[in-house]
Amino acid sequence: MPTNAEPAAEAARRRTFAIISHPDAGKTTLTEKFLLYGGALSSEAGAVKARGGRRAATSDWMELEQQRGISITSAVMQFPYRGHVVNLLDTPGHRDFSEDTYRVLAAADAAVMVLDAAKGIEPQTLKLFDVCRQRELPLLSFINKWDRPGRGALELIDEIEQLLGITPTPVTWPVGIAGDFRGVVDRRDGVYTRFTRTSHGSAIAPEEDVEPERASREEGEAWAAAADDLALLDAVGADLDPKSFLAAESTPVFFGSALTNFGVRKLLDAVVDLVPPPAPRTDANGNQRALDAPFSGFVFKVQANMDKAHRDRIAFVRVCSGVFERGMIVTNGRTGKPFSTKYAHQVFGQERETLDEAYPGDVIGLVNATEVRVGDTLYLDPPVEFPPIPTFAPEHFRVARVRDTSKFKQFRRGIAQLDEEGVVQVLRDREVGEQAPILAAVGPMQFEVATWRLENEFGAPVELTTTSYTVARRTDAVSAERLRSMSGVRIVERADGDLLALFESQYWLARLEQEHPDLRLERLVAEGRPG
């Protein structure tokens, strides 16, 4: 990275975006192919150019992810492309990890939504899109797996508009139906690009630009059908509109196949050309922190045990302003305490290397910054506080107990770490203490991850017991004392000091609210506000 560069000038070169999708839509494959086109992978797709000749999976680095074949945790990767610095944030695909996805999206300036050509909009797609809508993130759409049998292109475009309520503006259009993919026409200039397969998709797909007259002769009916579709799109005015894209009112659409690399370059070009560079970030008081202001950033993720050899803990920080320099003393806005950033890394999947400088839009990994929590603001004077990252209301509750009491110390340390990371919310009853905390989750798979990590990373096998609780509300000390004497209610405390009342049913909650309107019972959904 350049030294002593102007933060605003360096920010203009950054593109920081997240990839979201329903499981099995091809998000992880697309992530790897972006890295291939950015020169960050070896000739074998999925192998990072690691130090010392080692290879590591790019995004699904956790052992449980590899066992299950799904993304469970988010990952951060940076690579150069066309003179720009691309920061790619991979997100979990499963709906049970929507809260982690939301935290990652808080650090992104745009998102790429990956859709399966055979399945289109799936339930999790809707939920992820709603998260993007809440954050007003510009959205690119990639209709993937066009090399396999699937639905019609026009049908998929209509579905995006009808189900998501956003205007699709196709930028590329496929020649050949799903399963007979020949190439794409770029609607901006009318150029037809024909693709050639490579062995196992391990290399950049050769591309050939073909004139329309020749394409008509060589592609036959496939070209004629694509031409009819293109005429229809032109007639209805479904053209790229950068202004409405940036306003999150329209989504540029691209067709391709991540597996064969068809259309991947055009999508990556669009990330550079269309995704906005980092802009001044609004603080908790509604004021903007200028890009050239002294360093500031916010913590959007904490992850432990990425490196099995060291069992360390990394706090991921999105740089919002100024220049980050390794070793600088910054202040944590939550605690008011200073700390040194001596151990700052650039994290690439599971790989890492020492990072000396970073600019707005970049992501820093602070190793063993034990006092840092998700949502914290870090800064050099003048002080700044960015809005908190919202947390989701838990819908599932389990009591956790260590199977071997001699492992209680490891159990307590592991529970605390999972709470800090946001893997689960940990709720404690003052009458029970640390022996049997309640784990609260948005989805049940979070419990599977927590159980696996407690056993495999902390050496503390646990037993989870189901509870009868189904809904939580925030309360205060006065209301909590009254609620403790009522049946069907349990009062617990989160690590942040908030008191929660757990109820066995919505019906019982509604009855108490009706009979005791003076009780403080606040909803937990969308706690805080987007930053």
Image: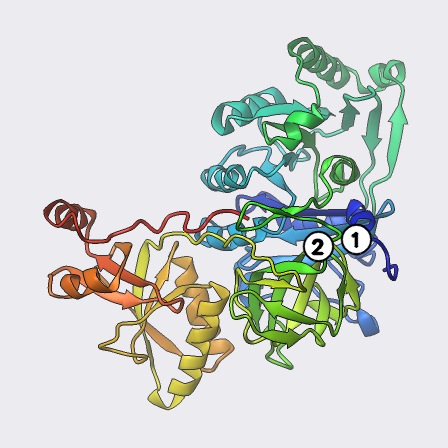
Where in the figure is residue 485, as x and y percent of width and height?
11, 65
Where in the figure is residue 276, as x and y percent of width and height?
71, 39
**Visible in this render: residue 146?**
yes
Going from N to C along the chain, the mark reached first, 1 or 2, is 1
**Visible in this render: residue 460?**
no
Query: How many dots with numbers?
Result: 2
Q: What is the quadrant of residue 255 in the picture?
A: top right
Residue at left 63%, top 75%? Answer: 339
Question: What quarter of the picture does the N terminus occupy?
Answer: bottom right
The kind of residue tagged 2 is: Ser
The residue at which mark 2 appears reads as 321
Indicate left or right for 133 with 329 as reference: left
| Helix, strand or loop at mark 1 | helix
Residue at left 25%, top 54%? Answer: 470
Rate crowding at label 1 as few (under 14), some (14 to 19) or many (20 or more) other CA atoms within 10 Å: many
Dot 1 and dot 2 residues touching (CB under 8 Å): yes
The kind of residue tagged 1 is: Pro
Indicate left or right for 91 with 269 as reference: left
The residue at which mark 1 appears reads as 7
Rate crowding at label 2 as few (under 14), some (14 to 19) or many (20 or more) other CA atoms within 10 Å: many
| Helix, strand or loop at mark 2 | strand
Which residue is at the front of the view, 503 or 143?
Answer: 503
Residue at left 19%, top 56%? Answer: 504
Indicate left or right for 496 with 288 as reference: left
